[in-house]
Image: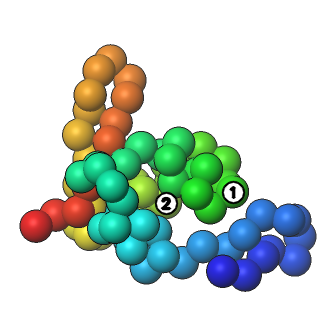
């Protein structure tokens, strides 16, 4: 993982995020868990997860009025 020269925030690859989702103890993850793992904002984690979902590398499920979880497509 590298850092962005404009800030202290790390630059995380899509593959690194996918690997985190694949190897997580639970079958799904939240954007908050991704944000915490990689020291990025919840908004950045949500954006990255949505992009992976758009590419059909992961899927999402709404679990309440506003919460989502993300999981690997089998």
Height in image: 36 above or below 5? above
Frontmost residue, 37 versus 49? 37
Residue 44 visible at all: no
In the picture provided, is 41 more to the left or to the right than 13? right
Q: Secondary structure at mark 1?
A: loop
Percent position (x, y) of residue 71? 26, 55
- Which one is closest to the eye, mark 1 or mark 2? 1
Residue 39 visible at all: yes
Percent position (x, y) of residue 9? 78, 64
Mark 1 = which residue?
39
Residue found at the very far top of the displayed protein: 65
Whichever of labels 1 and 2 marks the residue nearer the N terminus, that label is 1
Frontmost residue, 62 versus 37? 37
Q: Which numbered marker is on residue 48? A: 2
Percent position (x, y) of residue 36? 61, 50
Q: Secondary structure at mark 2?
A: helix
Question: Residue 53: which quarter of the image?
Answer: bottom left
Determine the residue positioned at 32% across, 18% down: 65
Q: Quadrant of the C terminus?
A: bottom left
């Amino acid at each position: 993982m590298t850092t962005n020269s404009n800030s202290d925030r790390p630059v995380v690859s899509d593959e690194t995020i996918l690997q985190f989702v694949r190897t997580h103890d639970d079958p799904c993850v939240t954007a908050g868990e991704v944000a915490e793992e990689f020291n990025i904002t919840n908004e950045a984690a949500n954006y990255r997860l949505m992009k992976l979902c758009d590419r059909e590398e992961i899927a999402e499920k709404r679990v309440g009025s506003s919460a989502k979880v993300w999981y690997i497509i089998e």
